[in-house]
Structure formats: structure tokens, C-alpha cells
Amino acid sequence: MSEVIVITSGKGGVGKTTTTANVGTGLAQMGKKVVLIDTDIGLRNLDVVMGLENRIVYTLVDVVEGNCRIKQALIKDKKYPELYLLPTAQTRDKSAVSPDQMQALIDELRKDFDYILLDCPAGIEQGFKNAIAGADRALIVTTPEVSAIRDADRIIGLLEANETKQLDLIVNRIRMDMVKKGDMMTVEDVREILAINLIGAVPDDEHVVISTNQGEPLVGTDCLAGQAYQNICRRVLGEDVPFLNMEIKAGVFSKLKNLFKKS
Amino acid sequence: MIPALFWAFLSVVSRNNFIKKTGKCIAGLQRICYTDFHRINAGNAALWGKNMSQPVIIKSNKYGLHLILDQSMPFDQLLDAVAGKFRESDKFFKDAKVAVSFEGRNLTQQEETMLIDTITGNTSLEILCVIDNDPKQEDYMKKQIELYQMSIQSPYMESGTHFYRGTLRSGQAIESETGIVVVGDVNPGASVSANGSIVILGTVKGNVYAGLGGDESAFVVALDMDPIQIRIGDILAKSPDKPLRRRRRRRSTKESASPVPQIAFAKDGMICIEPLSKELLNDI
């Protein structure tokens, strides 16, 4: 039984690609056979974040157009032999693929993989339609900002209309210091506005930037974001995992400072 | 190759044979044999238009196709007729590269474009040029086709090399049947591919494919060579996974303002990248 998950957000820059890379890698770490599909034709990034850019020979568009077989276009991950990437073309645009073609491609991949993760482009146009065409469930990524939440809300509406069975929310880039001061919405606020199941909350962590630049997902490492992503993976698999306490990071010094503030 | 096929048909195969062979595909050819062509051409095309029962007649000469169009028919219908005729004969034309000329009707620029679109849309023909209907046309067609044939016979000729000026950014790609010179950088996500060699007067951080047709004598020269992927002939090499080299390089470029130009070439099934030197160039 394989599951097709689309990672989407509506707004750009909230962390769809990072989430796809980390959740995919996390699932592979747990022994699942996973394929990541980049559907952002013309603005591909997933290959860069995965550090597999230099291996691309054939792309999703080549597969759809019949220039090669699926197996030829799949790129095996550097670390995990059960993790594959299907990159997309950079020199084409979204109209190169249709939702029906995506559906057919996914049905073909279902035979070989436990999880198929689709990295959705920003926006609600053709690229989005392609990405959600064959999805069983969706992870909606948002940040605790009004603009991102507004877009996520629109996306949820569209996914419901598309009859995607299961929708889960990931709140990304939370800054606990700002939340505490009341300058940022809490995870609970966001969940209440969007009213769907919360599957993960990821803190704003500089390690994410470093890992992205190095092309190595950080899931499973002992930094906060790495833990958060691993928890998301476990929840995707159906485990019941308590949410992270994101305040662990506060050192002795800041604790002291807080003490003084109070007194 | 296919124009050569036309040529062979007309010069080697006897005329009768030719008509028999193509008669199935090209209606109209049965009625006008090749020698008539010049006469029609010199004479009054309009006269022919009136007598024609067919809306369009396709004739071939040494270098391409000659279309005789019905004068009185509405243009839409004519387009349909042209589409039909070419669809029928698609198999025969295959992916030939030809010059085209029209006769029997005064065409506006728009109509001419529509006709050409119809032809290319219904066949895999590649139209190299359109010839105006005048006595010099055959000479001109001849020249065009011969030029093309020359370029495919010796694809690596320096004279056919393309120039590109400016930076190639992510998603941009240039391709050439001959060689390419890029005056500018090739950024990650951009690609340069050529049947011949590639020279880049700038930094290569994208993909370069030289010798696309499988020619391993092709080479790549760049002022700063740091491609994501490099392909020469059928050999493919990718950049190292750990960006160690890049970091070192960045520092070194800071120290010396002008990096050493490098050349990539195929040797024993591998791609070697070495600083450009006179000896190396002499070897290649």
C-alpha cells in the first residue's frame, strides 16, 4: 500500500522544498521506500536541497514525453539507497505536463514505492494542479504570518474541492522568543484559524539554512528542527508523538536574564 | 541527408520511375512531369490555376518543393486542401529539409506564414526558406540547400560556430549543430550543448555538453571551469558532491584576479580538465 503525499503551501518561501527533503529523508531513515518528485518545472530546487543536482540527466518532463523510462530518470540518494529523487526540467515551464500525465506517472511509481512525496510549486495555477492531481493526502506548510495563513486557507479550500482525503498542517519557522513577547502567533492560533489536523511544528533554526546550503537534509540530527522533522515523519507513519518543547534551547544565561526581568 | 535523397531520385532514378514511385503520395505529379516545370514557371501561372481541378499541386525540384495553388478558392479551403495533401504524403517526406516556393496566387505575408505553419504542422518537414517566385529562384534554393548540406557534412567547421553574448542564467539553454562560443558566464541550471566544441569566455557553473553527436574529439574551454555536469561525446562527468574544490577555488580567484583558463577533453573514456597550454592545444 503506497501513499502519495503532496507538500504544498500556496505562498512561496515558507519551506515546502525543505519540508519535502526532510520528511522524505526521514521516512527513508525509517526503512521506507520513498521517491521525491519535484513538480516545480522551470524553478526546480529540490535537487539542490538534496545535493543531487550534479546527477541529473533525465527529468520528469523527459519521462512524460517518452524520451526515457522512469527508472532512468530516478536519482538514488547519496546516503539512503531506498530514497530516490525524480527531478524536473529547468528549461521548460509548467505547461509541459498535464494533470492526467502526472496521475499516470504516479500510478506507475506506486508499484515500487511506499511513499511518493510531491514538492508543489507556489501558486494555484497549472503547476499546483499537476502536483495535487494524484495525491492521496497533503501536508500544508505555513508560517505564523497572516499572508502565509491566508494562502494556506485558500489551498485547503482547493484541496477539499479536489477531494484530497487527508489534510495535515505543518507550522514552520516558529520563533519562540517572538511568540513569548506576543509578536508572533502561536502554533495553536494557526491551527485554530485553519482548523485542520496539526502534524508538526518546526522552529526557525539556523541549522536549516546550513543544511540546505550543503545539500544534506538535517532530519534526525540533534538540533531542534531536525527533531521536529523526525517527529513529523513518525506522525506521518501513524505514531502518536508528543509535540516538542521548543524552549529547550534557552541557555543558562537567558534564564538568568529572565529571572532578573521578572524581579 | 533527405535533400540528398531527392537529388538521388531525380538524377539517378529515371523520370518515369520517379513518377511511379511518388505517384501514390503526390497527386498531381502524374499530370505534370518534371520537364514541364520550367515551362509553367516561365509561362502564365494564372492560366494553370483556371484549368486546375486540384486546389493544390505539390511538385518537387532538386532542392525543395514547389506549390501551385488554386487562384479562386477561398483561402480557408485552400489551407485545408494543403493540410490534407501534406498529411497524405507525410511518410514520403519524412523529416526532409527543403526550400519552398508558391505559385498561382498572390499571398500576403500572413497567408504565407499560415501556409508554412500548415505544412510544418502536418508533416515533419523542415522548411529552410521560402523562395519568391522569380526566375532566379532555383539558383537561390540551390545555394541555400548546398550551404546546409555543407554544414551537416562538416559540423565542426569553425565557420559555422555560433556566438552567444551575455550571461546564460538558470533555465536558459543554447544548442548548436556546430560549435558555440559564449562571451559571458554559464550559471547553474543553464546549459550549453553543441555537436562541436564549446568555448566559454567566463565562468561555467552550469551544464556543458560538447560533441553531442558522440564526437569525443570535441573539447570545452572556459576561463573558470566549475560545471555541475560536463559531457563530451558519450562520456559524462559530474561535479564532486563535497564542494571542497569550489571553496578553495573561490579563495584562489580572490588572490589572483584572472583565473587560469582551463580545457576539458576526453581521454581514455574519462574527461580531463587541465590548465590551457600551448602543448595541449597542439595535441588536440
Image (spheres, rainbow, N blue to C red):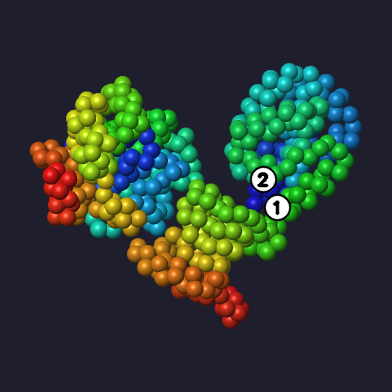
> Viewer-proximal residue, A222 or B137?
A222
Q: Residue at x 42, y 53 (%)?
A: A57
Q: How far from the left and from the top, in percent, is residue A225?
A: 22, 48
Identify residue type, mark 1.
Tyr
Which chain does the numbered disc 1 sit on? B
Q: Is residue A256 visible?
A: yes
Q: Earlier in the sequence, mark 1 or mark 2?
A: 2
Pointer 1 and pointer 2: residues touching (CB < 8 Å)?
A: yes
Give the SS element for disc 2.
strand
> Viewer-proximal residue, B209 or B38?
B209
Number of residues whose C-alpha sits closer than 10 Å to that of mark 2, classed few (under 14), some (14–19) or many (20 or more): many
Q: What number is the disc on residue B148?
A: 1
Q: Residue at x 85, y 29 (%)?
A: B45
Residue A157 lies left or right of residue B152; in this view the side is left
> Viewer-proximal residue, B9 or B118?
B118
Residue carrying label 2:
B97
